[in-house]
Image (cartoon, helix red, strand yellow):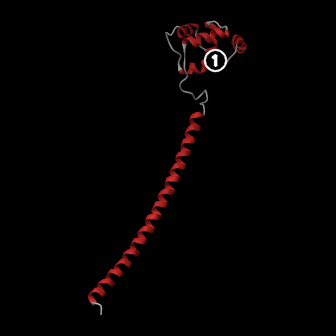
Amino acid sequence: MPNIASVLKEEIARVARKEVRAETEKLKKASAQYRSDIAALKRRIAALELQVGRIGKAKASTPKPLEQATSLRFSAKGFSTQRQRLGLSAADMGTLLGVSAQTVYNWESEKSRPRQRQMAAIASVREMGKRDAAARLAAFAK
């Protein structure tokens, strides 16, 4: 006949294992759910970062309109070359830009630099050809 103490001890151990197994199953299920949630969030973050990168590249590649450009570059040598290419005197170039001939000479000799509003006029002259410049000068003469 089995000893009551050993039977009771075995029964307690069996019930305890059953309880522990039930609790650990709940923890395993919760842990698996958390892992799948984390994986889904990581995928979502990767997709969003990809979209941000595409948007950043799209914004960087769109050029600013000339009127909104804040920093137009000026080179005295390039300005002089442009004037000579158009076949204009300093006085004629000054008339096109709305400044004096002396100002044009000062820009070309790097004694001064054009102001921001004058840079826009210089940029528009850069796009002209000889005929356009002559036509505009003729319009100013009238």
- In terms of depth relative to the viewer, which is nearer, 37 or 27? 27
- Identify which residue is drawn at 61% across, 10% down: 81
Q: How many marks?
A: 1
Q: Name the residue that disc number 1 marks.
A: 126
Asked whether the viewer can see residue 83, the reply is yes
- Identify which residue is drawn at 64% across, 14% down: 96
Q: Quadrant of residue 65?
A: top right
- Identify which residue is drawn at 52% across, 53% down: 43
Residue 51, relative to residue 96: is it above or below? below
Residue type indicated by callout 1 = Arg
Q: Quadrant of residue 134?
A: top right
Q: Residue 111 location, x and y as percent?
A: 49, 9
Residue 115, relative to residue 25: is it above or below? above
Q: Residue 29 location, x and y as percent?
A: 45, 68
Q: Quadrant of residue 99?
A: top right
Q: Quadrant of the C terminus?
A: top right
